Amino acid sequence: MKRFGVFPFLSLLLIVTTAGSLILGKYPIAFRDMAGFFLFKFFHVGQMSTESCQLLENLLLDIRLPRILAAILIGASLSVSGTAFQAMFVNPLVSPGLLGVLAGGSFGAALAMIFFKSWVAVQACTFVFGFAAVLISVGVAKIHKGNTVLLLVLGGVISSGLFTSLLSVVKYIADPYNQLPAIVQWLMGGLSMIEVRSLVVIGIPQVVSIVLIALLSGYLNALSMGDEEARALGIPVEWVRMLLIFLATVMSALTVVVAGMIGWVGLVIPHVTRMLVGPDNKVLIPASALIGAIYLIVVDDVSRMLFNVEIPIGITTTLIGVPFFAIILKKARRGWS
């Protein structure tokens, strides 16, 4: 498949996947009924009873569509974030959680669930502590002189370890009957509680961050060649890397805010995309956004329909991601070296 010919195909596949997700579920809807509802609702074409219109509006617009839009935003954000991290750290095995944003955000959410009753407070603490974790990682790299990339990775290990330990403390002191189940459920990730208001709040900064990273894809190409080569091209390496880390962290933190821990998307999808379109980040970034969106829609459909009880999407992405990534590594003939 030609590099740029992949975009019309992926765009069409995203539309088909979205339509399929709208009609699939515990209460399946015929495509003809869905099309008739949208024509009647938005264009006043055709006829439909009040009861049928209200039922389809609840299913399609109030329940399924916000969930699908959330899957698109989160899948695209995690994929682009992972692609950016892999390019700027010149390492195909890093993911959006590299600098501790997922561990920090998880600790913030768990802490807020114990001390605050407001869901807004939980979301705010998730974002704040996610960024705090990244600041610790960057601070470690700034304090010590040497290989910036290596120091950032080590700072991420320190930050992730710190907040993972703090999360364990919070879980230990939480009420085992009321608070702990809520914390565990949230940490497993899910899209069932997505609201339109939350989508608007996270959607704007996520879309802006994706666009900015796409515009900076030329700098990512330079960084992927190494710091010395990038400096030789006149690129302010440290400033560009920090800007890219900030944008990728914004996307990752916001996904944790609304959906909890959804792992492996930012690690697997960049590899799949790279196999399809090559390593040029000018093509890789938008392609990974589309593939990540499609992937998370499909995984969410599997999570909510495979069994009578909905499986948290974070569990499903892990169960799919681990063996899939092992296969990708084998086919790409890559190892830890």
Image: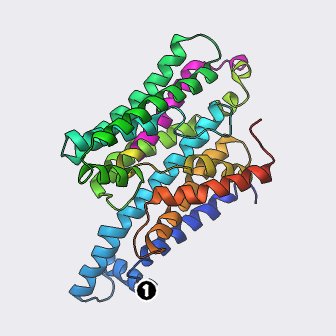
Q: Is residue 252 one of those drawn in magenta?
A: yes
Given residues 330 and 249, the one toward you in this image is: 330
Residue shown at 54%/29% (left/top)? 157
Image-based side of 327 in relation to 318, left or right: right
Mark 1 element type: loop
Residue 171 screen position, x and y as percent: 33, 42
Residue 10 x/y as whole percent: 61, 61
Which residue is drawn at the image coordinates 45% and 23% (left, top)?
A: 136
Magenta stretch, residue numbers: 231-255
Label total for image: 1
Would residue 157 be counted in the magenta stretch?
Answer: no
Say which residue label 1 marks.
30
- Label 1 crowd bin: few (<14), some (14–19), many (20+), radius 10 Å: few
Principal secondary structure, stretch drawn in magenta? helix
Residue at the image position 39 percent from the left and 72 percent from the top: 309
Instruction: Say if 246 sits above or below 303 in the image.
Output: above
Q: Is residue 246 visible?
A: yes
* Residue 122: % across, % down: 27, 43
Residue in the image at 56% along x and 11% along y: 144
User: For residue 236, what is the image quadrant?
Assistant: top right
Q: Position of residue 33 (x, y in %)?
A: 39, 86
Choose between 29 and 168: the one closer to the eye: 168
In the rendered structure, which amino acid carries the disc numbered 1? Ala
Give left or right: position of 213 versus 252.
Answer: right
The quarter of the image holding the C terminus is top right
Camera sees residue 42: no
